[in-house]
Amino acid sequence: MINKIIVAITGASGAIYANLLLDNLMQIKDQWTELGVVISNNAKKIWNTELNNDNYKNYPVNYYDKYDFNAPFASGSAQYNIMLIVPCSMGTLGRIAAGISDDLITRAADVILKERKKLILVVRETPYNLIHIRNMETVTLAGGNICPATPSFYSKPSTINEVAETVVNRIIDLAGLQQKSFRWGSEK
């Protein structure tokens, strides 16, 4: 299946996950026909702070302003079938859970949910309070998938990128995309 993918990057800590996700999506271009990216202003600041660059500008994808309601994926008729919010702030999660479509990210998430497509929220907060947990439950019951930015260590990662890659590999798997990555029980 050829996919149409939305990647939203919000202002939570964890720009490394978005960076590695975009890198990996570039390696599997044969699995998607369109890739739209929405990055909030806070996400740009955090990317610059955490990664010391503004490389989010350099991917050969379609970029959309956070308030561009004319973006194709603001409507279900555009038939985007995967949305990845990486990292997903708790504010974004809360607005999605409450059905508040006040920007392109939350509108696109609402569209993905109503069309019964894949919505994956990579929440990046710790600890969770009860409001966070209930919002995650609400999105899950509506058909979304909560994928906390919790790395695994059974692949014995030795660099921060390898640790973060364990989360990104999980995101790509959850999206139904094919990739080469470490699998439980296999050799590194």
Image (cartoon, rainbow, N blue to C red):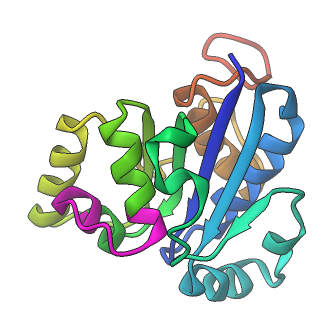
The residues colored magenta run 94-106
The answer to whether residue 149 of the structure is visible from this angle is: yes
Name the quarter where the N terminus is drawn: top right
Residue 157: x, y in percent? 72, 42
> Is any part of residue 80 visible from this angle?
no
Q: Residue at x 45, y 42 (%)?
A: 76
Q: With respect to residue 58, does 172 lie above or below? A: above
Please tell me whether residue 102 belongs to the stretch shown in magenta.
yes
Quarter of the rendering occupied by the C terminus:
top right
Residue ID at (65%, 52%) = 164
**x, y percentage for residue 66?**
54, 76
Q: Nearer the viewer, residue 89 or 109?
A: 109
Residue lying farthest to the top in this orientation:
185
Place of residue 174 in the rendered image (x, y in percent of width and height, measured from the top left): 52, 29
Determine the main secondary structure of the stretch shown in magenta: helix
The one nearer the camera, 170 or 141, is 141
Residue 19 sits inside the magenta stretch: no
Q: Residue at x 58, y 22 (%)?
A: 176
Please tell me whether residue 63 is drawn above or below residue 133 in the rendered image: below
Write the residue at 72% across / 20% down: 178
Within the image, what quadrant is residue 108 found in? bottom left
User: Quarter-wise, where is residue 99 in the image?
Assistant: bottom left
**On the rendered structure, is 146 left or right of 95?**
right
How many numbered marks are there? 0
In the picture, measured across the screen, residue 66 lies left or right of residue 164, that is left
